[in-house]
Image (cartoon, helix red, strand yellow):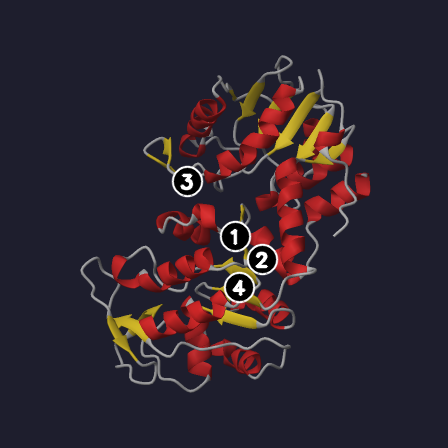
């Protein structure tokens, strides 16, 4: 994949005002960031800019506040605190920044949640122009928001004096290209999640390019039901049975789609719930499928051990509950043990990877969820398109 964009690392940065769009949308509890993965991923970009004498202003969103309203619960203050600790320097949080940002060469500030600004998610041109006026160089480094045409990811790049891609964005795109364009085969994709409908396009696209397509969660339940199994009260989408049947029949392409041969069920997901292993065609009316069973996990593990390339988005069960975590644990451990080039993306997927201690064994961890899926579908990413247009 030839990336026809300007790169931050190829530009003169000394003394320049850099507006760097990062994805620092981290989970926060009791005023503290509970997972710093996205912050850590952004560090090399920030450190490079500072080492080269840039005047760095970072912008990011956090959550989904109502435009024009300042929500203290969605302030980036905890992010600024942790970012300062990771960088080993003060990172001031600037609350009123749209009319100008005072930052000296070799220093960095964090602008308060960009989604507090009216017009951000609407990609308002007036806001985009004001963002562009804050910088000499705009750096798009937030792969996780590259599928959004927002003022801070798309509009600003149209008007900034120079618009370029940061190292994190470049790294994400190169890793995805390696996994999709000339992959080592066989290619195995694992797609989990609650709904077929939200991942319809990516399932269809992957079916024509990968060799095996492992599905989990509500997606697997829908396929089981389409194949004739009575899945009790399990989460599924009856309106997607037609699509599921075509996927199983390989009408979309080469990919084999193995179905679970055993599942873990319970009548609830309460803390006290206990799982029972059953065959998918032996479920009681009140049973809910909440994980894959041990035989299925073993079968999928053997498939992953033969893979040359692995793509993973979505857990295969309710991994947050100890009773229903073993399937996703098995998948994570099998990917970690394989010799394949592996790339994983999506919030739940990264949480599972962290939970099961295999962070260092996955070849590449993508910071994107929606952007990751959109790239897998083969759809253009608006932020990248704008960078290419400006180049």
Q: Which residue is mark 2?
A: 373
Q: Is residue 163 visible?
A: yes
Label 3, label 4: how far apart the Cα atoms are:
23 Å
Q: Which numbered disc flags the more N-terminal residue, 3 or 4?
A: 3
Distance Cα–Cα, label 1 vs label 4? 16 Å
Q: CA distance from mark 1 to mark 2?
A: 8 Å
Query: What count of labels does the image hold?
Result: 4
Front in this rendered view, residue 54 or 122: 54
Tell me whether the residue at label 1 lies in contact with that at label 2, contact meaning CB atoms closer than 8 angstroms.
Answer: yes
The outermost residue toward the bottom is 228
Q: Nearer the viewer, mark 3 or mark 4?
A: 3
C-beta proximity under 8 Å, tags 1 and 3: no
Q: What number is the disc on residue 198?
A: 4
User: Residue at coordinates 65% horizontally, 27% vertically from top-left?
Assistant: 19
Q: Quick one: label 2, few (<14), some, or many (20+) residues within 10 Å?
A: many
Is disc 3 placed on a helix, strand or loop? Answer: loop
Nearer the observer, 75 or 243: 243
Badge 2 or badge 4: first in the primary sequence: 4
Is 43 situated left or right of 161 in this image?
A: left
In front: label 1 or label 4: 1
Task: Give the residue drawn at x 52%, y 27%.
Answer: 112
Look at mark 3 in the image and give the residue it sits on: 27
Tell me which residue sits at (59%, 27%) in the image: 46
């Amino acid at each position: 994949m030839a990336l026809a964009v300007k790169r931050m690392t190829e530009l003169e940065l000394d003394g320049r005002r850099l507006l760097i769009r990062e994805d620092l949308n981290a989970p926060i509890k009791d005023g503290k960031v509970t997972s710093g993965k996205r912050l850590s991923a952004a560090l090399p970009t920030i450190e490079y800019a500072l080492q080269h004498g840039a005047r760095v202003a970072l912008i990011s969103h956090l959550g989904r506040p109502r435009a024009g309203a300042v929500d203290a619960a969605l302030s980036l203050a905890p992010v600024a605190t942790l970012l300062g600790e990771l960088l080993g320097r003060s990172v001031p949080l600037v609350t009123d920044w749209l009319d100008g940002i005072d930052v000296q060469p070799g220093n960095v500030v964090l602008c308060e949640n960009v989604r507090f600004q009216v017009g951000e998610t609407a990609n308002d041109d007036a806001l985009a122009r004001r963002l562009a006026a804050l910088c000499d160089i705009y750096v798009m480094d937030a792969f996780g928001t590259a599928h959004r045409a927002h003022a801070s990811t798309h509009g600003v790049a149209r008007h900034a004096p120079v618009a370029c891609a940061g190292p994190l964005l470049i790294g994400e795109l190169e890793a995805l290209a390696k996994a999709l364009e000339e992959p080592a085969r066989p290619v195995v994709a694992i797609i989990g999640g609650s709904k077929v409908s939200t991942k319809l396009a990516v399932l269809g696209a992957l079916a024509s390019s990968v060799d095996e397509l492992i599905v989990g969660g509500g997606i697997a339940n829908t396929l089981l039901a389409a194949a004739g199994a009575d899945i009790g009260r399990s989460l599924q989408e009856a309106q997607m049975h037609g699509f599921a049947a075509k996927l199983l029949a390989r009408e979309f392409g080469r990919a084999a789609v193995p179905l679970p041969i055993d599942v873990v069920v319970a009548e609830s997901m309460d803390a006290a719930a206990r799982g029972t292993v059953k065959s998918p065609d032996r479920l009681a009316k009140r049973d809910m499928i909440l994980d894959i069973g041990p035989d299925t996990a073993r079968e999928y593990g053997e498939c992953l051990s033969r893979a040359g390339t692995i793509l993973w988005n979505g857990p295969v069960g309710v991994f947050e509950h100890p009773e229903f975590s073993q399937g996703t644990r098995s998948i994570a451990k099998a990917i970690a043990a394989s010799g394949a080039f592996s790339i994983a993306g999506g919030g739940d997927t990264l949480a599972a990877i962290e939970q099961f201690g295999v962070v260092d064994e996955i070849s590449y961890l993508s910071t994107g969820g929606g952007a990751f899926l959109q790239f897998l579908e083969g759809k253009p990413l608006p932020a990248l398109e704008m960078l290419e247009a400006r180049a």
